């Protein structure tokens, strides 16, 4: 079992920046397939990938977000970060921390990001 706690969401004007943090209750990157990252869900839409990072450091971004969003991690703190720059109103969503560990998916409770025009 693992608990994920997100922080850093909020209200920001278009063009602004936010940094999300996700702290895990235990070490995540133990096996080759383990990964941690972020998904988002806008109102009335499906949850979609934002970015993930694997044990070996491989990063996968949603194609349209690469260049504005940057995922990083601090292994010592079991924490993953999402730096979001040049935010747009269409980035408004609930952002969920996610991890794949020991063959299971785990989700955080989500943090709201609202970008005003």
Image (cartoon, helix red, strand yellow):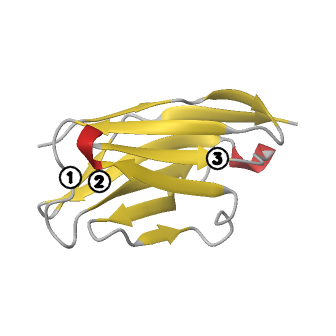
Residue at 83% from the left image edge and 42% from the top image edge: 15
Report crowding for label 2: few under 14, some 14 to 19, many 20 or more residues within 10 A (C-alpha): many
What residue is pinned by disc 3? 84
Q: Residue at x 32, y 36 (%)?
A: 23
Left or right of 93, for residue 48? left
Residue 78 at x, y percent in the picture: 26, 42
Which residue matches tag 2?
99
Name the residue tied to disc 1. Answer: 28
Q: Earlier in the sequence, mark 2 or mark 3?
A: 3
Q: CA distance from mark 2 to mark 3?
A: 19 Å
N-term mark: 3 or 1:
1
100 vs 25: above or below: below
Q: Are there few (<14), some (14-19), or many (20+) residues within 10 Å of tag 1?
A: many
Q: Are marks 1 and 2 in contact (CB under 8 Å)?
A: yes
Can you say which quadrant of the picture contains the N terminus? top left
Under circle 2, the secondary element is strand
115 with respect to 75 (left or right): right
Give the Cα separation between the discs numbered 1 and 2.
Answer: 8 Å
């Amino acid at each position: 079992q693992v608990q994920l706690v997100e922080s850093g969401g909020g209200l920001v004007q278009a063009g602004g920046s936010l940094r999300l943090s996700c702290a895990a209750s235990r070490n995540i990157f133990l096996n080759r397939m383990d990964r941690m990252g972020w998904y988002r869900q806008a109102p009335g839409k499906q949850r979609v990938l934002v970015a993930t990072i694997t044990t070996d450091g491989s990063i996968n971004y949603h194609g349209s977000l690469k260049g504005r969003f940057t995922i990083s991690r601090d292994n010592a703190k079991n924490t993953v970060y999402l730096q979001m720059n040049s935010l747009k109103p269409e980035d408004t969503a609930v952002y969920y921390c996610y991890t794949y560990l020991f063959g299971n998916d785990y989700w955080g409770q989500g943090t709201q990001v609202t970008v005003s025009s």
